[in-house]
Image (cartoon, rainbow, N blue to C red):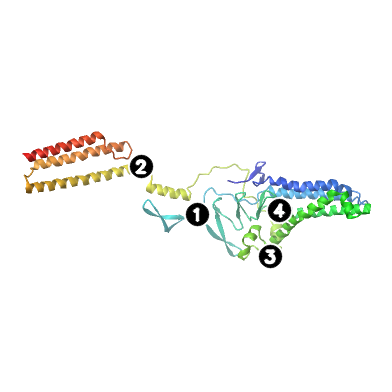
Amino acid sequence: MVLVKFILGGRLIFGPDAKSLLVTLLLITVPVIIFCVFVARHLWHAFSPYNAGYAILAVAIVFTIYVLILLFLTSARDPGIIPRNSHPPEEEFRYDSSVSAEVGGRQTPSLQFPRTKEVMVNGVHVRVKYCDTCMLYRPPRCSHCSICNNCVERFDHHCPWVGQCIGLRNYRYFFMFVSSATLLCIYVFSMSALYIKVLMDDHQGTVWKAMKESPPSVILMAYCFISLWFVGGLTGFHLYLISTNQTTYENFRFRADNRINVYNLGCPSNFLEVFCTKIKPSKNNFRAFVREEVSRPTLQSIQGAEAEDIGGGDPRPKVEDDLEIGEDLLKISQRRNIEEIDEDIRSRGSNGPAHTALEVDAILDSDHRAPTIRSETRHSSWGRRSGSWEIATDDVLSNSKVMESRSYMTGKEGRQ
């Protein structure tokens, strides 16, 4: 499931945690409003010759709008999402006869799918991984964001403050937003300190007296000082990453591996790549209508179909096979009955009166008729499609009567 929010028909794209963007807006606009009302307004006439005091307020407003635009460009655009595939790449399937699976008592070659493959980057082989969620091989420097549930090109990190992934298409705006927020903090801190200095000169007092006269200035200075540790430190860290052509993800994950950075083109070229190259167009048309694609057989469905063809399927052929086995068993039982009769004849030929050929035929005919009744009973049970071999009670009684009559006739002939 793609965890992305669309606004204005797909023109604006936000991450799943876009609500945190409101917190960021408040952290920027509220201090600036306090600055304009309680600090910049009192500095209008501080530079009387050219009315330079008005410029302090104008710069604060314009610079804040510029920071908000950069925040909007960072959080409301496609960071470089790679479109998903509806099925795995079939050209990568291969059958491996060395690894076979036994299905239905038959050895079949196993369908293999490579999890990684190598591509060439700046003359160096780089291994890329297969993404099970997006069903594609990730391009170099691409990673799957667990929060947005998308593969993002040149994935840097997922920033909760902007509610969006930082990738190939918005990293430039992200760095400009962070660095501009740093400059805005420095500006507000400096102008608040300047206002404290103006109060000291006007009243010829100490710093403490000036701070008591303007508590908002003190609050703004403390707020900007704390914020500088975050946005200023983040700006310095990303300056280092840009100069070495790394991403935050690569820096934290491969720091201990001592890998060669195949993407490092030198400090000047790295800065030109980030700030002076044309941003690639989005690979997604989020405003287009979704078309239903014919589902193609996947790896699991192929293996399941093979197993069904071998061991499952229609139960009717299985019933027919059971009937053939039952007939074979009847034939075997008939042969055993004939053999017992032959032995009986031989024993009687030596110890008692011999049977005539007519008597033997009568006995054999009775042995053949009894199984015929059973076979008809079995065929009727198959007609019910129950698959059982139960014999009806009437059939059992009829079979027992036939056997009793046969034994009675044999005993009577013996007495004669």
Q: CA distance from mark 3 to mark 1?
A: 38 Å
In the depicted structure, whether residue 126 falls above or below residue 300 = below
Residue 266 disc label:
3
* First in sequence: mark 1 vs mark 4: 1
Quadrant holding the C terminus = top left
Q: Residue tagged by mark 2?
A: 315
Residue type for callout 4: Phe
Relative side of 384 to 260, left or right: left
Number of the front mark, 2 or 3: 2
Q: CA distance from mark 3 to mark 4?
A: 22 Å
Residue type for callout 2: Pro
Relative side of 100 to 168, left or right: left
The one nearer the camera, 315 or 171, is 315
Relative side of 190 to 105, left or right: right
Q: Secondary structure at mark 2?
A: helix
> Which residue sits at x=90%, y=55%?
206
| Neighbourhood count class around disc 1 (C-alpha, 10 Å): few under 14, some 14–19, many 20 upward | few
* First in sequence: mark 3 vs mark 4: 4
Residue type for callout 1: Glu
Residue 91 disc label:
1
Q: CA distance from mark 1 to mark 2?
A: 36 Å
- From the top left corner, tell me how far across and down residue 149 is, in percent: 60, 49
- From the top left corner, tell me how far across and down residue 226 is, in percent: 77, 54
* First in sequence: mark 3 vs mark 1: 1
